[in-house]
């Protein structure tokens, strides 16, 4: 690998810091969305379980 100057190394560190910060924000957003989806799924399962049992549909034969 070609040698880098101190300034080039510092610039690369800055770039990587920005990438890490961006990834952290993306991860936070994904975790929030996952939690919202888990809450909605729990709500829907509760609604599903509260429904009365369905009678089997009669087949209309030909």
Image: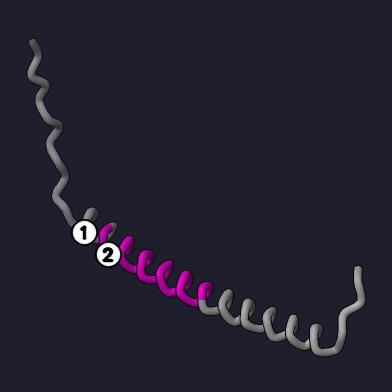
Give the residue displayed 23% in from the left and 54% down from the top: 48
Q: Indicate the quadrant containing the N terminus: top left, top right, bottom left or bottom right.
A: bottom right
The label on residue 47 is 1
Q: Is residue 10 left or right of residue 1?
A: left
Tell me residue 61's x, y (percent): 9, 14
Q: Are marks 1 and 2 in contact (CB under 8 Å)?
A: yes
Q: Is residue 15 magenta?
A: no
With respect to residue 60, does 53 lie above or below? Answer: below
Q: SS for tag 1?
A: helix
Outermost residue, top side: 62
The range drawn in magenta is: 26-44
Query: Viewer-proximal residue, 45 or 33?
Result: 33
Apparent side of residue 43 relative to residue 4 in the rendered image (left or right): left
Could you say which is closer to the camera, residue 47 or residue 33? Answer: 33
Q: Residue at x 14, y 41 (%)?
A: 54
**Which quadrant of the structure image shows residue 49?**
bottom left
- Category of crowding for the residue at label 1, using alpha-carbon neighbours closer than 10 angstroms: few (below 14), some (14–19), many (at least 20): few
What percent of the width, then of the height, locates residue 10?
77, 88
Q: Secondary structure at mark 2?
A: helix
* Residue 57 image position (x, y, % from top left): 12, 30
Say if 23 sits above or below 48 in the image.
below
Mark 1–mark 2 Cα distance, whole angstroms, equals 6 Å
Q: Is residue 39 magenta?
A: yes
Q: Quadrant location of the C terminus?
A: top left
Residue 16 versus residue 49 in the image, above or below: below
Which percent across, then down, holds residue 19? 63, 77
Q: From the viewer's perspective, is residue 52 above or below residue 61? A: below
**Rendered residue at 26%/59% (across/down):** 44
Mark 2 = which residue?
A: 43
């Amino acid at each position: 690998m070609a040698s880098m100057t101190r300034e080039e190394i510092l610039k690369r560190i800055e770039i990587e810091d920005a990438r890490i910060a961006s990834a952290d924000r993306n991860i936070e957003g994904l975790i929030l969305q996952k939690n919202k989806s888990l809450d909605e799924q729990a709500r829907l399962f509760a609604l599903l379980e509260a429904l009365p049992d369905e009678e089997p549909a009669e087949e209309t034969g030909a």
